[in-house]
Amino acid sequence: MSATRTRSSDDAPPASGGRAPASPISWIEWARVTGLAVGLVAILTYPTIPGLLSMGRLDTGDGRFSIWNVGWIDHALLTDPRHLFDANIFYPHTGTLAYSELNLVAGALGLPVFALTKNALAAQNSAVVIGFVLTYLCTWALVRRLTRSGPAGLVAATAFTFCPFLQCHTAHIQLLMAFSIPLSFLAFDRLREAPTIRRAAALGAALTVMGLSCAYYGIYGGAALGAAAVLFGRRERRYWIALGAAVVVAAALTAPVLIPYVHAREASGVAESMSRPNGTAYAARWQDYFTSPSIAHGWLSQGGAECTFPGILALGLAGAGVVLTLRRGTAGDRRAVGVFLAVAGLAVWASFGSPLGLYDLVRVVPGGSLLRAPVRFGVVVMLAVAVLAGYGVKALARSRAWLAPALITGIALELAAIPWPLQARDPVPRAFQMLAVLPPGPVVEFHFPYKASDFHNQTHAMFDSTYHWRPLVNGYSDLTPPEFEALAVAINAFPDEPSFQLMRKLQVRYVVFNLDDYQGEARDRLLARFPAYEAYMRRLTIDRNVWLFEIVGWPPGSGGA
């Protein structure tokens, strides 16, 4: 008598062109790949791990903003999650975290380290390291599943995780959360194989992670995944129902974050800090596809604004994957190669922006009009090339066990852009240590950049605020309060009676001066203003040319007694 067993809904037979299912991944295999991923990340992001507590992209406004952003999310989650959106910048405005991307996923990855250290640099760096390890694991799992080859997955993961696009954006924490794209394609491939409710829910959750990781990835990656879903589509009702269910799940999971985010932006009354280009100003140029930060690509780089060159080995393997799979691959493999080749072509097309037409279709997607960099479709190109390279490894390494390790080493050496351009922070001035323990009160930090073209330097004060988290009149983001530019001009005359009046209106309690920001006559004029207002400003500390004052009174001309 033959034994039978009941098959669950998630055990449905494969419906993906007759493709044999990939073998299950054992915990030993996961452990080995994770160990390889950690080792490669430690080497190829050097000195991120040794400098976990003390180094970061402190040389750019975007880098300082990213550190502040991750730090604020973690600080708020640990102290007052209900006011997560009420970041400490642009005081007295509220909802200021919504003036730019939230970066919740990066914050979540950095939270354990922040909880232990209370160090925003450590939180940012740990989020980067974990994000890169996850990118490696997700890409490996995706390509292993598609090709049924573990070595192919390892080579593809190396090519995508350390691709020039990501290594060019070490200052943009949201763009380093690239693991969400292969994760979403992995969830989609599982649904394609067996369109069940469980797998639809998993795809919806992956899409949510992709959208909350980075708005560009949510829309550009979502568009690429939509194209793949159509190209892989078949006349099977449950396939389309499962895709629809995934979209519903993603919308339901995103809504609790998206709705407050939209409301905060609408209620702010702020204006764009820069005009939104029409899809051309930050579009790709041909030079971008021949530009890379890799040391090995110095002879090739054409000085593009972005780095969207996939790598010589990756391109060669991708070409081999296309040719060899189309010649002698299975029907399922040929179809997959065709789809990812089409996705790469569409992404390249869209990356050139509105002049070539396709990008205008992406701008119709909800939220698409807010994005201003079509060239960032390059990350989709990188993933598609890596997947195709995996098929090349599968075809070439069948009887060559040595080939995959050699290719992993070769790709790592080719793409290496080490050391990363991280800077060590200076010792923390006593002023910021004192602010962390003094009675609460809003802070203004000088120098206070007052030209819109110079607002990115407000991120110096934002980074300094990660040591105390007091409300800060300074601020920088994608959106700027409408009165901020006028305020910045007037407040720079402090101390004088009109600026005291402004400080009183803003309820400012503490004032920080970094004297290193003032040189020559500007410094002399500043110091000459102090004697007339000594009765209203109590000096609390001078350390490393950073002065901290507490406002203890108001001159008569400012409305005070």
Image (cartoon, grey):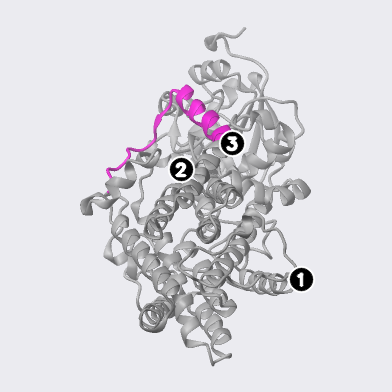
Residue 1 is tagged as 1
Q: Earlier in the sequence, mark 2 or mark 1?
A: 1
State the extent of the magenta-drawn residues as a range. Answer: 255-279
Amino acid type shown at disc 2: His
Q: Nearer the viewer, residue 183 or 374?
A: 183
Q: Earlier in the sequence, mark 1 or mark 3?
A: 1
Whether residue 219 sits left or right of residue 559 in the image: it is left
Task: Judge depth for marks 3 and 2 and give the one in front.
Answer: 2
Whole-percent x, y for residue 34 in the image: 68, 69
Q: Secondary structure at mark 3?
A: strand
Q: Nearer the viewer, residue 290 or 295?
A: 290
Q: Which residue bears the numbered disc 2?
A: 456
Image-quadrant location for residue 69: top right
Whole-percent x, y for residue 1 in the image: 76, 71
Q: Nearer the viewer, residue 429 or 286?
A: 286
Task: Judge depth for marks 2 and 1 and give the one in front.
Answer: 1
Answer above or below: position of 507 versus 83: above
Image-quadrant location for residue 256: top right
**Image point 68% across, 53% down: which residue?**
122
Label 1 with label 3: CB-CB less than 8 Å: no
Q: Secondary structure at mark 2?
A: helix
Residue 391 is tagged as none
Residue 513 is tagged as 3
| Distance between the alpha carbons at the discs numbered 1 and 3 | 87 Å
Whole-percent x, y for residue 139 in the image: 55, 66
